[in-house]
Amino acid sequence: MHRAAPDASIERVVATPAALALIAQLEARHGPVLFHQSGGCCDGSSPMCYPQDDFLIGPDDVCLGAIGGVRFFMSESQFEYWRHTQIIIDVVAGMGGMFSLENGTGQRFLTRSRVFSDEEAARLKADEPTG
């Protein structure tokens, strides 16, 4: 199936309280959901929220972890770009991605990030497979 990101002890993805509240609202309305970080195209680079059974995770997708109990994925090629940062999912006013469940709520998910500290980066590197 999909590949897990190295070192689950460091949270690669976290969510703000506002994002967690919107996730709970969407799950109450739609049932189990998942996130996939869009890599461009129609909705730019947005965190997209889908019904869990309506989105097929590819074999090259990486699971960064879970926010509010909801798994968060991105493509392996995007993970290579983002691997040095912690993804922070937030919510702002606006229109969500056209295929994302928050569309029509007056809010949209937004990806923020921070670079891992030197210590975190060293721990992540030490846990990565070699060769």
Image: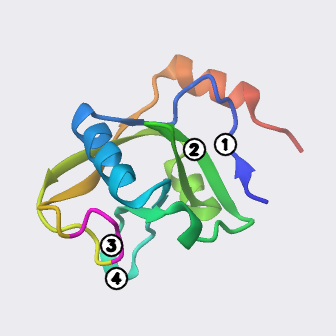
Residue beneath the point at 17% across and 62% down: 105
- Between the residue at mark 4 and the residue at mark 1, the CA separation in whole angstroms equals 26 Å
Residue 129 screen position, x and y as percent? 82, 38
Disc on the earlier residue, 1 or 3: 1
The residue at which mark 1 appears reads as: 5
The answer to the question of whether label 1 and label 2 lie on touching residues, with beta carbons closer than 8 A, is yes
Taking the image as shown, residue 72 lies to the left or right of residue 114, namely right
Mark 1: few/some/many CA within 10 Å (<14, 14-19, 20+)? some
- Between the residue at mark 3 and the residue at mark 4, the CA separation in whole angstroms equals 6 Å
Disc on the earlier residue, 3 or 2: 3
Query: For residue 48, which quarter of the picture?
Result: bottom left
User: What amino acid type should be assigned to the residue bearing mark 4?
Assistant: Cys
Residue 42 screen position, x and y as percent? 34, 82
The answer to the question of whether label 3 and label 4 lie on touching residues, with beta carbons closer than 8 A, is yes
Residue 112 makes an appearance in the image: no
Q: Main secondary structure of the magenta part?
A: loop
Element class at badge 4: helix
The residue at which mark 4 appears reads as: 42
Which span of residues is magenta-colored? 99-103
Mark 4: few/some/many CA within 10 Å (<14, 14-19, 20+)? few
Vertical placement of 30 versus 122: above or below?
below
Q: Quadrant of the image for the N terminus? A: bottom right
Label placed on residue 53: none
The answer to the question of whether label 2 and label 4 lie on touching residues, with beta carbons closer than 8 A, is no
Disc on the earlier residue, 2 or 4: 4
Is residue 94 highlighted in magenta? Answer: no
Residue 44 screen position, x and y as percent? 32, 72
Q: Residue furthest right?
A: 131
Vertical placement of 46 versus 125: above or below?
below
- Between the residue at mark 3 and the residue at mark 2, the CA separation in whole angstroms equals 20 Å
Mark 2: few/some/many CA within 10 Å (<14, 14-19, 20+)? many
